[in-house]
Every structure is written in structure tokens, then in C-alpha cells.
Amino acid sequence: MTGPEIDRLITLLARLPGLGPRSARRAALHLIQSREAAMVPLLGALGDVAERVRPCSTCGNVDTRDPCAVCVDGRRDDGVICVVEDVADLWAMERAGAFSGRYHVLGGVLSALDGVGPEDLSIPRLEARCADGRVREVILALGATVDGQTTAHVIADRLAETAPGVAVTSLAQGVPVGGELDYLDDGTIGTALRARRPV
Amino acid sequence: MTGPEIDRLITLLARLPGLGPRSARRAALHLIQSREAAMVPLLGALGDVAERVRPCSTCGNVDTRDPCAVCVDGRRDDGVICVVEDVADLWAMERAGAFSGRYHVLGGVLSALDGVGPEDLSIPRLEARCADGRVREVILALGATVDGQTTAHVIADRLAETAPGVAVTSLAQGVPVGGELDYLDDGTIGTALRARRPV
């Protein structure tokens, strides 16, 4: 009863992460009923992004220019590259505001199960970036999962060969800020205990 | 770091019902990274709907034609009008597939708290539709809330005056299909008990 145009919009909205069929219907109806306030602006914003945003050929970030704003920012340190799994992680690092070097987006992590090998990720491009002599340190900011840590080890091994002068580090593991011990898993508590520091 | 175009897209997506700032970021990134599979189709579907979908001037449904597909469907019974609060409720009734008359979308319910009076809803238009002599019954399919039931009573009172030949009914209240007594609120159990029927 909704007609093919509305059905198609609902189907496409339902494919967005975070929206199911029910919320996609509500979202579509909201857009239709708030035409000027919601539909027209979203259409414009989506069109702008579709037309102008591209992946950065240096780091893999997405931006309206290539190289991206992070790669061309003169205030950032060329000597440190933070390796992240995807652009969402790059955004999360930037929101934290604690890092002022460059980034390298892998585009995933190695996974034997999903058949993702080093050639599927941007590891060769990372090695090329590390070979130019300006990079002092590569920070591996990968998830504390089995695949994330496997990927970190593979990258560390490869960089030890291809860019032996570059220090490879990873994010500290431990108790999250605001985390209560009672709610933490045993692995995190064990890791935090082994990595304990003098106060 | 995301640039004004992406920021604007995230802001607009976050205003959709069901999406918060976090899921809006994920949705925006998904669209950017699945350009051909997600962004371009959504842009097309949104453009189609924005260009072609309008409210039906008879019943208040939304469709690409006016009167809408439900209002012009010759297989439907002109003698019964189902009154719903909004288009989402009309869609829900149609999904249930149990009704084959016409609809009337009120555009809300009466609410003293929110300052919604009868003139803010399409009650006068409903009265006009009921005055043409073809309508035998008006089914009030409004929510079992205080405002919904107040609205139902007001409509019933007004129709008793302006269209005295029209029967006004409302949806039955009781135990939902698949509902377990243990999980039902006391009000529903009490209502279902008072409205008990012979087996």
C-alpha cells in the first residue's frame, strides 16, 4: 500500500547499520512528513557527499580532497603514523584528541576465517610510507581481538624487515577510564595486573 | 577532521528516528564506503520520494498520487472508514491485512498537555466525508492511551451530531495474540476479563 518508491526507500534505509525494517519505516515516514526540514536537507547533504567525498590515496581516510585534511595538515608530525583498522577508528582517535601524527587505514584486519590476507589490506602501502626515512614510529591502534592482535604482529614483523629503523608500538591495554573492576572481564583484569605501573 | 560535508550528513542522519550520533556516524561511513551499493541507490530513492510523494488530500495517507492508491482502489468498501492517528498506523493496519475499507489519518490525537485541539486534527474533514451518505461505519483505531481514548470519545460525540446515521466502533481491547498473562499489565488483564466472551 506504500507504493514502489516508498518501499524502495524503506528497503535502502533498512540496510543502513543501526536501522532495522521497523525503524526504517519510521525514518522514511519522518522524511516524507518533514519534507522541508528533513528530506530536502538530507538529499542535499547526501548529494554533496556522493559527489565530493573520496578515499585519501595516502592514508585511506575519506575527505573531499585527496590527500585528505589530516595528511596535508602542516601542524601534524610526519614522524608518527597511527595504524587503524577502518575510518571509524580514525574518527574515534581524532575525537579523543590525543594524537597529532598521521594515520594509515588498513581497511580491515587479517582473518583466516574470512580469508583476508596481507594483500587485501593496505600493508604494502604502509611499508612504502615507512621507507621514506621521515617516519620514526608506527603506533598499531588495532582492536584487542585475536584478529587485531594477529594483524599487529604481522605488521610488526614485516616492518622489522622492510623499515628496521622504525619503532613499532601498540596502544596500552588495561582498565578503561571510568571502568569498575566488578564489571571487567578476567582477561582485562589480568592484562592490567601484569602491566601494572608504580604510582 | 571529517570535513563540513560529512559532518552535515552525520548531523542530518542523527535526526532520523532510531539513529543517534554514534549510529549516524556508522551509517554515514557505510554510505561513503559503499558508494555504488548504498549511497547512489539511496540518493535516487530519496530523490524519487521527495519529488513524487505527497499527502493524499482525501485521507491523509502519503503516496505518489492524490487521491492515494487506497482511496482509488475499487475493491475497497466505501462504507467503512478506519480512523488512525498517523500514517505509520495506517501502514500497520495494512500489514495486518484485516481491513478492506478506507482510511482517515487524523495527524495526531487531542492533547491538552501539548495544546492539540480538534481544529489541529483532520476531524472536520472526517465529518465532511461521513456526511456524503455512503459511509455506514467509522472504526476508531486509536491507541489505548488517555489521549487516544479522549480523542475517540470526542470524535464519537461529534459524529453522533453531524452524521447520526453512521455507526462508530473502536478496536477491541484484550490479551494480545501470543501474549502471556504473566507479562501483561493489570489494566489489560482487567479489560480482557470485563470483555470476556463465550467460547
Image: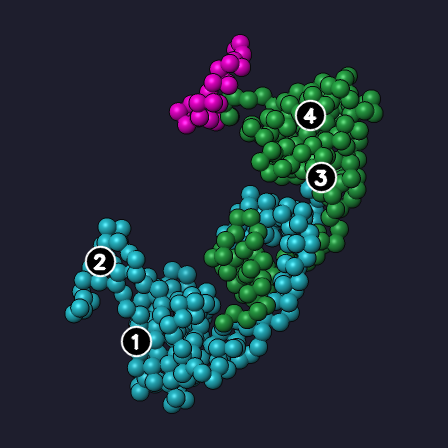
Chain colours: A green, B cyan
What percent of the width, then of the height, locates residue A196? 52, 13
Q: Callout 1, which amino acid?
A: Thr
The answer to whether dots 1 and 4 both sit on one chain is no
Which residue is disc 4 drawn over?
A: A155
Q: Is residue B67 visible?
A: yes
Classed neighbour count for the residue bearing mark 2: other residues with Cα under 10 Å, few (<14), some (14–19), many (≥20):
some
Residue A61, disc: 3
Label 1 residue SS:
strand
Magenta stretch, residue numbers: A177-199
Which residue is disc 2 drawn over?
A: B189
Q: Callout 2, which amino acid?
A: Ile
Residue B128, disc: none
What percent of the width, then of the height, locates residue A26? 49, 59
Classed neighbour count for the residue bearing mark 4: other residues with Cα under 10 Å, few (<14), some (14–19), many (≥20):
many
Which residue is disc 1 drawn over?
A: B169
Separation of disc 2 and disc 4 at Cα?
Answer: 63 Å
The answer to whether dots 4 and 3 both sit on one chain is yes
**Dot placed on the residue nearer the N-terminal end, 2 or 1:** 1
